Amino acid sequence: MRKHGWIVFLLLIVVLGMLCHTVLFKVGFDEIVIIETFGKAENAIYGHTDAGWRLKWPWPFQRMVRYDARIFIFEDTHEQIQTADKQNVLVTVFCGWRINDADLFIRRISTVAEAEVRIRSMVRDIKKQVVGKHRLEDFINTDPTRMLIPQIEENEILPSVQERAAKDYGIEVVTLGIKNLGLPKSVTKIVIENMQEERNRVAKSYEGLGQAAADAIRSRAEAARDQILEFARAEAKSIRAEGDRAAAEFYEKFKGHEQFAMFLRELDFLQETMKENSIFLLDPSVQHSIGFFSKGPSLPPLYDGKTTKPVTAKED
């Protein structure tokens, strides 16, 4: 009896586990779960707001369908489209979308793979319609201010795709834009030649403006140079004349005392050279003023010009 009791207990645990697995389920943060009762979809459970454990009836009463709530990204095909001015351009569009209305989505599409196919077809049709309304210069232009790609993406292609996707399939188109833009070989040569001509015109215009500005700057610089030189010459003449007058006065004062003048010059020399702590190795025979450090400063003896003996001063 004990052996059979353990078997019954294990069977009950297995049955209970299978029942829990059948009726109990978990909704993740990045999931959308729809419960179908006898084939009819009920309200969807969105993980970003109602994540957690839930209960349902086992099959065949109820069936659970899971969808990824994250954004799906795809790129449109690189195809040739004719613009309003009969020029061909190659355009590739990228698109990011996610499930917004799960009830409508499961009724109209039911699978993510099928949804991407329909969104691709929708984007392709709207892209052709919008590009066909614009001229080539709205997409490719040497003047950045005349290129309308951001406005075409945000104001024409994206709103049209968003409206149709939400209305028909319960899909929210989060982002959409032009990824690649190219030209066929037949158009590339013409576009390049037109761009070269326009760039040459702009370059010549800037060269003319630059030359005019350079001439004006050169003229102002020459005028300023002449004015400065004239002022400097006049100032130099004034300083030179003042110096000549001062020198004449000093020459007149020291004309009768030449030795005293040389003595003062030697003192000035020492004052200028000994401003800071310095060491000089000089010979007094070369510079007379160096001898002052050993004998002290003194004036050389006076001579009367008739004898070689020094003249002594007379006391009054």
Image (cartoon, grey):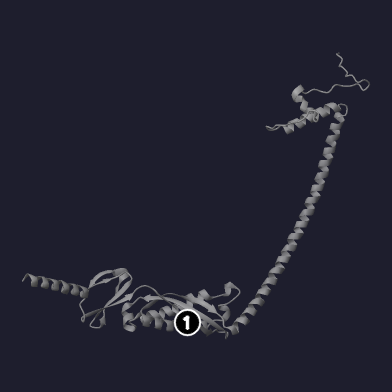
Q: Residue furthest left?
A: 1
Residue 15 coordinates in the image, percent (x, y): 16, 74
Q: Residue furthest top?
A: 316
Residue at 25% over, 82% down: 40
Image quadrant assignment for residue 292: top right
Q: Secondary structure beneath disc 1?
A: loop
The quarter in which the N terminus is drawn is bottom left
User: Crowding near pointer 1: few (<14 within 10 Å), some, many (20+)?
Assistant: few
Residue at 46% over, 83% down: 124
Image quadrant assignment for residue 168: bottom left
**Above or below for 279 versus 211:** above
Q: Nearer the viewer, residue 240 or 223?
A: 240
Q: Amino acid at mark 1?
A: Thr
**Above or below for 295 versus 147:** above
**Above or below for 23 versus 253:** below
Residue 5 coordinates in the image, percent (x, y): 8, 71
Q: Residue furthest right?
A: 306
Residue at 52% over, 84% down: 80
Residue 293 coordinates in the image, percent (x, y): 74, 25
| Horizontal side of residue 182 vs 245, given as left or right | left
| Horizontal side of residue 132 vs 62, given as left or right | right
Residue 308 coordinates in the image, percent (x, y): 91, 21
Image quadrant assignment for residue 240: top right
Residue placed under numbered mark 1 in the picture: 77
Q: Nearer the viewer, residue 172 or 309?
A: 309
The quarter in which the C terminus is drawn is top right
